[in-house]
Image: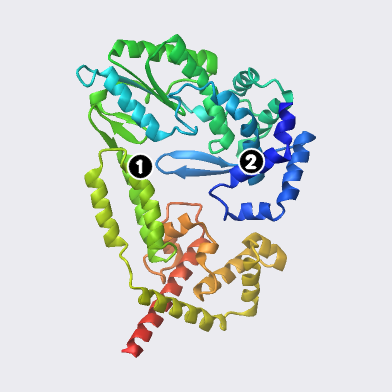
Amino acid sequence: MLYTKLCSYENLFSAYQKARQGKTKKHYILTFEKELEKNLNQLQIELITQTYKPKPLRTFIIRDPKTRKISKSRFRDRVIHHALINIIGSDFSKGFIYDSHANQIGKGTLKALERFDHFKRKASKNGTCPCYVLKADIRHYFEEVNHSVLISILRRKIKDEKVIWLVKQILSNISENPSGGGGERLQGMPLGNYTSQFFANVYLNELDQYVKHILKAKYYIRYVDDFVILSHSKQELELYKEKIDRFLTEILHLSLHSDKSKVLMLDQGIPFLGFRIFTHSRIIRKANLRKFQGKFREFKTLYKERQINREQVVEKLEGWMAYARQGNTYKYRRKLLQRFNKDFPIKNKSQIILSKKITNFFRKYYSSKVEFSVQKTLFLLRKGLSIEEIEKERCLKQGTVWEHVINLIEHGQLAVWNIMPKKKIVYLLQRIKDPEEPLKQIKERIYDQRITYDEIACVRAHMKMKEKIKKSNSLKHAKSH
């Protein structure tokens, strides 16, 4: 039976290996690996007895470049997701059309852009006649996927009811946010789950088949919920749009986004996969350029703070350069490299060694000034306990524990990078003008209400510690001369 194969230890171990790829140093993976066999056996028992219940999703909002709610599954649940796709994935992917390009091996944005170029040459007869593009987007796609419709599609190939039971468990999982409500969910999939990516393709494969085999559109490309159809006839595309909208409404219980679904002339520039595509060129969209500029500023801050080195910045830059190379960006890439060489110069190694010696001296010197109670908090932090856990362990107020943390950071005994998310630290470093500035004054300049006074105090303490190191550095140099 299919479900027996899904529950096998071999399949769960393979799923675990896939789930950990690229994240081997994450603390939750290291914790899972400490008792790997026990954890996999536990998952196997829960699946066999059908007592498996996913943990609530951890939900957070990202606003770069647009506001989206991302839901993150716990690692044990991600193992189950991979175990499921290991078993049912190939049966469905065989039926996908060639020009479905998202979340598939051998496909992706580059292949989709290459196909767009191929189709625009065909539709415009090598630029000799006008070319029109139906650029469409499905409204709130992940939020509105109908579970009943999805299950009925899956049942065509999956005859094992236990596998369907597991799919329902995954689909009905809700956020840990209390406002998410309870009970069984009838629509929507969390953006961020591996299974959501797979089910998104399965669901919209119905649209792909309709467009290719019923409408018989030649030049059609889909990437998740974005799709384009190219043609030399504007009237034909308007008719396609009307029929597709009706199909989505009646069969899949979805609808086209009215503002983002239009028939455009290729010469106007078609927004697709982060680029604006014209008849003879392809340029990066301004929103994507602004997004990278923000990241570049973040790299500068992290480099200045010695949280990343020049080689790590090069690695991050290479990914963006590879993406930018897909467009007509020669001058932009040349200027970016010039800016990189200016902002991330190769430093003299002897100066770096000297700086490290001073930092270590500073930490040893101030460790004697830290009180025993604070040192006890440091010991628990190094054991991996959170602020809340230390509060309970030591029967202290949370504010007292935060005072200890701030004290440790200022005296160089604890790195702020081990206490707070990197994004928050970088954000605050760019907004705190002076480490002696009052907390209230800093807080008034910060728009993100999730950032607390304690977190501001931690970053301010980090800046004070850096100032002390600089003073020690200048004194050492003065004495040496």
- Residue 440: x, y in percent? 45, 63
Q: Is residue 232 left or right of residue 197?
A: left
Q: Secondary structure at mark 1?
A: helix
Q: Secondary structure at mark 2?
A: helix
- Residue 221: x, y in percent? 40, 24
Camera-side mark, 2 or 1: 2
Is residue 249 depicted above or below 442 in this figure? above
Q: Are marks 2 and 1 in contact (CB under 8 Å)?
A: no
Which mark, by number, is residue 106?
none
Report the residue at 75% width, 36% height from top. 47
Mark 2 is on which residue type?
A: Ala
Q: Does residue 402 appear anywhere in the picture?
A: yes
Quadrant hosting residue 14:
top right
- Residue 358: x, y in percent? 44, 80
Is residue 157 depicted above or below 277 in this figure? above
Report the residue at 65% width, 36% height from top. 83
Q: CA distance from mark 2 to mark 1?
A: 29 Å
The 10 Å Cα crowd at callout 2, few under 14, some 14 to 19, many 20 or more, is many
Quadrant hosting residue 322:
top left
For the N terminus, the image quarter is: top right
Residue at the farthest left position: 128
Q: Nearer the viewer, residue 199 or 452?
A: 199
Which mark, by number, is residue 15?
2
Q: Is residue 473 left or right of residue 73?
A: left
Is residue 375 depicted above or below 155 in this figure? below
- Residue 8: x, y in percent? 73, 37
Which mark, by number, is residue 323?
1
**Counting residues from the N terminus, which is met first, the one under dot 2 or under dot 1?**
2
Q: Does residue 145 appear anywhere in the picture?
A: no
Mark 1 is on which residue type?
A: Tyr
For the C terminus, the image quarter is: bottom left
Report the residue at 52% width, 71% height from top. 409
